[in-house]
Image (cartoon, rainbow, N blue to C red):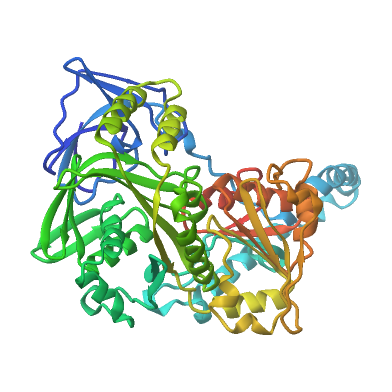
Amino acid sequence: MHAYLMPSFQADLLLLSSSEPLNLVYIETVRCEPPNNRLDRFTGTLTFAGQKYPLDNEKILLRGCTLRNTDWCFGLVLFGGGTDLSQTRIDKKKKKSSGNCQLIFGFLAFMCTILAIGNLFWEVNEGSQFTVFLPRQNDNKIIRLGNSFYIDWDRKMYYGRKDTPAEARTTTLNEELGQIKYIFSDKTGTLTQNIMVFNKCSINERVDFSFNRLADPRFMFHDHALVEAVKLENPEVHAFFRLLALCHTVMAEEKREGEIYYQAQSPDEGALVTAARNFGFVFRSRTPDSVSIVEMGQQCSYELLAILDFNNVRKRMSVIVRSPEGKLSLYCKGADTIIYERLDQSCSKLMEVTTEHLNEFAGDGLRTLALAYKDLDEEYFNQWKQRHHEVSTALDGREEKLDELYEEIEKDLLLLGATAIEDKLQDGVPQTIEQLSKADIKIWVLTGDKQGDIFITQTKTFKKYRIATVAAAVVGIVQFRCYILGSYTMFHLIYIPPMFRFPQAYALEHSLEQEFLKTACMCKAVICCRVTPLQKAQVVELVKKYKKAVTLAIGDGANDVSMIKGIFSMTDLRT
């Protein structure tokens, strides 16, 4: 299939070549798994000239995707009928309010019986003079239609910055808005602006600067000591920013000399690469086998030997590169708890100081990452690379075997420091939450981020409220904190039920879900941290199941789809 710029793909394709250089591939045989609904995973092998090459989701173009920043490409059709995308679709269902459902199922049988009997008498006595009026249901529809116009015309719902008014997409849920008892919201991009700004960093026991707006032409910061350390070629500082310039999946586009535009899958990665650029370590380009950066004005090309991808289980990403001098190095970045488990014992003192800095960053509501590296032995890496190739071309158990290899090489790391990225709240969020709380509407924030109190640290609105931390513990892969918002002076209350003291416990398991819900419903607002997309949907379903309440789910990302659509039932409001 020959695809051009912008039109979406009509089938799942294996990318063969494109207008971009250094990516021409010729195919003999492709063996892969059958179509399934896992869009983030793909397992297959490509055979060319007797040699096998691994295929993963990064080499696949899914049906419905759009080609951007590339003029054309050729692709081999893998799945033309039951594509991966088609298996994830949920048939749209007509939205009905709970009032309609109660009317239909509660009174239908009764009314039909009464009217059928009464109709016999009416037809005999007054049938010829009886006048049939318009059904009241039609009157209700007209009233709802008028309400939807008022929503569209409401100036208080107009967003002037983007010239976007409110738009009522349905007229069947108007009366439901006044019955909402629980609001479930994502944090990043929904409550926050999703504009990541590199704010602070910790390098070799030092917090080197306190502010950075990262507007490329007007890069501003307060602590000039960090710039001096870069100029003086401090080895730890250079290694820190070299890691940021190498360990990522960002694509660079340079239309004119010196005008570099970064395209990142994650805003966090874009902010980190931009920070490295502004401190003299400029990422210029990449090919499948190399990464080109400019280190303090000198062009350097690093051979890219392996990428150990990030996922929600690993919570880290690593790259293995060979420097121009021939030195093999592994650079790793990820969640601090994950990185700490893989550090060499010699980093214990540095780890303690960095932990203090990370706690300060988290206390300021910043998103944090830990950075580490290690030098590799040539002979050991060659053996590891051979095993990696064998495992990556296997069709059975590939992911589990790759995880074992990654665990083997990602150990005895040396800590470099930590980064802190700011994602500011959107305008009006604190005031909106305050008003909703006064209306006795409970707010649940479901986020994949670590524990961080964005309401307290970034605004003054909640300083007058009473705050209690309930069950602030790791519950399997779920961490949650509950905040009680009262009207008294601030105080902290920590209460950990006995069942939450065991790390193997899961709050959403059947045996624990009611206890979790009972504890959470004692609070006016709840923040569930480190939750997966499926767990978001499970939390929403848990409240609906036992509370029988009208709920509202809000989100802006792919990981919020199951929560917003209400895959367990269709009684949610959706935005």
Out of 295 and 99, give the one closest to the viewer: 295
Q: In this view, does 122 lie above or below 28?
A: below
Nearest the viewer among 339 and 572 is 339
Question: In screen coordinates, is 159 left or right of 117?
Answer: left
Q: In this view, does 282 lie to the left or right of 54?
A: left
Q: Name the residue furthest top.
A: 50
Residue 136 figure quarter: bottom right
Name the residue rendered at 31%, 38% in the picture.
58
**Residue at 68% of width from left, 46% of height from top?**
503
Q: Is residue 101 visible?
A: no
Please tell me in which quadrant of the rendered image residue 174 appears. Answer: bottom right
Q: Where is residue 93 in the image (x, y as percent from the top left)?
A: 58, 44
Query: Front-most of 477 and 200?
Result: 200
Residue 243 or residue 485, whichever sits in front: 243
Eyeballing the image, is 479 above or below 148?
A: above
Find residue 272 and report its horizontal and vertical position in percent.
33, 62
